[in-house]
DNA sequence: GCATCAATCTGAACAATGTTCACATTCAAG
DNA sequence: CTTGAATGTGAACATTGTTCAGATTGATGC
């Protein structure tokens, strides 16, 4: 909300300040509410300053996306393991969709090919890293070897399992539940009451 | 490609001309390449003209989205029915993902909450209509009543089946296969060789 | 201490975009 | 015809991303 006033001419750590500013803006106003100038003003800096730290808007947003993927990965890693494969896969999927629902703007960002440099090595690394736990859970459920994502294998069951969670996440942030559920808060209603049933139907014990 | 020159002061049918222009631009340059001014120039008209026919950029893009959903629905309706539920559901899902792969720009458009008026009745109607065939195929596969989309029921198996296709479509247009497949044309490779296996694994006979 | 050079930031450009508005042109109904 | 509504023009205006010459500072070598 407040533009922190600066005493020194140099900022000190403008790079991370811009990333955090961008993340806050996207969290509060969505990707479409983000502008580079806004992030600069938020960091208390002139419009031209960011260009010294990022390769344009795309560079900054790519850095934000890396952060988002890392947090997503951390959240999925922190989910409890029951030892039962079906339960664990459902837990991972629930976590994935919940993350999207709780961070709609940021989740939209990491899917926007036009806003992000999808060839950035850090981004690729982070996006893979975020899904390792999910991939392991899916592999366990289908009785397959845990995939080495660096070998770039694409097993049918795995792809399907990823797609279902990814599709549910997109449906939620695209507001599709609002088209089906006539409730005050369609997204959270979907998450709390319907999503568990959907996941149970998809991957029964 | 060419801006059609106009002899008369009035265009005649600027509204549909703008819709078609926008669709062409999005098809060739993606949603991010679209600008309202470009569509106006394409229709051979001044930048202020579109405002007499659409409620801003969002209005025009919503109209385009309606067209896209209608075509998607038509394509899914035209798919052959084998009588075998599993086969038919796979066919529908294949058609859905293929549509996204063949029309990446337009598919991205119909998922962009920020660019489209999701409350527009025509849009809602078209988006439902497009998925009736898919919903019927899914209902048949799971041995359920074909859902009345206007009653806004949300059955777990149905939601899961929609999500899987939707998720696969998003993965394709987000270029995720390119992260996994080191082939010259990852999208079409995925569609042609891997997608059938994924669908078969998801909904076996 | 101090000189020098790279890093960092400013502020003013610039082109492009969506939108609005006064005005021009045309259509269509009485 | 004539009169009002519909449609199109073109010039605004604010905003945006980006660039760039110059200002300021930090760091390194002496």
Image (cartoon, coloured by chain):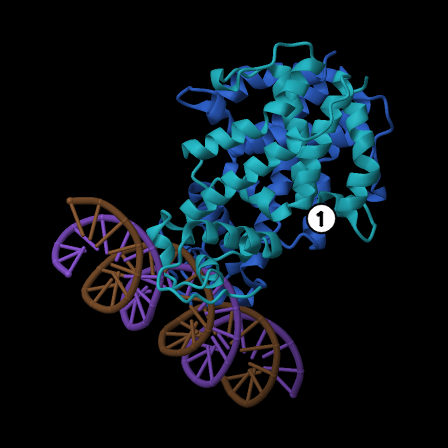
Chain colours: A blue, B cyan, C brown, D purple
User: Disc 1 is attached to a residue of which chain?
Assistant: A
Question: Vertical placement of A129 versus B11: above or below?
Answer: above
Mark 1 — residue? A124
Q: Quadrant of residue B147?
A: top right
For the image shown, how many numbered marks are present on the structure?
A: 1
Q: Badge 1: how crowded within 10 Å, few (<14), some, or many (20+)?
A: some
The C terminus of chain A sits in image quarter: top right
Query: Is B34 left, or right, of B195 in this rendering?
Result: left
Q: Residue at x 67, y 52 (%)?
A: A118
Q: Quadrant of residue B139?
A: top right
Give SS at disc 1.
Answer: helix
Q: Nearer the viewer, residue A105 or B83?
A: B83
Query: Is B196 left, or right, of B98 in this rendering?
Result: right
Q: Position of residue A44 (x, y in %)?
A: 40, 59
Q: Position of residue B59 (x, y in %)?
A: 41, 45
Q: Position of residue B169 (x, y in %)?
A: 67, 37
Q: Residue at x 71, y 15 (%)?
A: B141
Query: Is B97 left, or right, of A170 in this rendering?
Result: right
Q: Nearer the viewer, residue B60 or C29?
A: C29
Q: Position of residue B143 (x, y in %)?
A: 69, 9
Query: Is A165 left, or right, of A22 in this rendering?
Result: right
Asked if one can make out residue A78 in the rendered structure from this viewpoint, the answer is: no
Asked if one can make out residue A23 in the rendered structure from this viewpoint, the answer is: yes
Question: Vertical placement of A43 versus C25: above or below?
Answer: above
Q: Residue at x 37, y 48 (%)?
A: B54
């Amino acid at each position: 909300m407040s533009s922190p006033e600066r005493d020194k001419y140099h900022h000190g750590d403008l790079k991370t300040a811009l990333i955090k500013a961008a993340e806050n803006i996207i969290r509060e106003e969505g990707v479409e509410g983000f502008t580079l100038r806004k992030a600069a003003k938020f960091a208390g800096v002139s419009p031209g300053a960011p260009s010294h730290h990022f390769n344009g808007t795309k560079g900054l947003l790519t850095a934000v996306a890396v952060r988002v993927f890392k947090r997503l990965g951390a959240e999925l890693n922190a989910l409890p393991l029951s030892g039962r494969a079906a339960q664990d896969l459902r837990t991972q999927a629930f976590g994935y969709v919940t993350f999207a629902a709780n961070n709609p703007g940021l989740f939209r960002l990491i899917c926007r090919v036009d806003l992000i440099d999808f060839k950035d090595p850090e981004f690729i690394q982070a996006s893979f890293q975020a899904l390792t736990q999910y991939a392991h859970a899916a592999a366990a459920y289908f009785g397959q070897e845990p995939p080495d994502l660096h070998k770039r294998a694409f097993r049918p069951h795995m792809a399907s399992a990823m797609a279902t969670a990814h599709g549910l996440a997109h449906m939620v942030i695209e507001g599709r539940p609002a088209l089906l559920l006539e409730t005050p808060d369609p997204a959270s209603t979907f998450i709390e009451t319907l999503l568990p049933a959907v996941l149970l139907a998809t991957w029964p014990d």
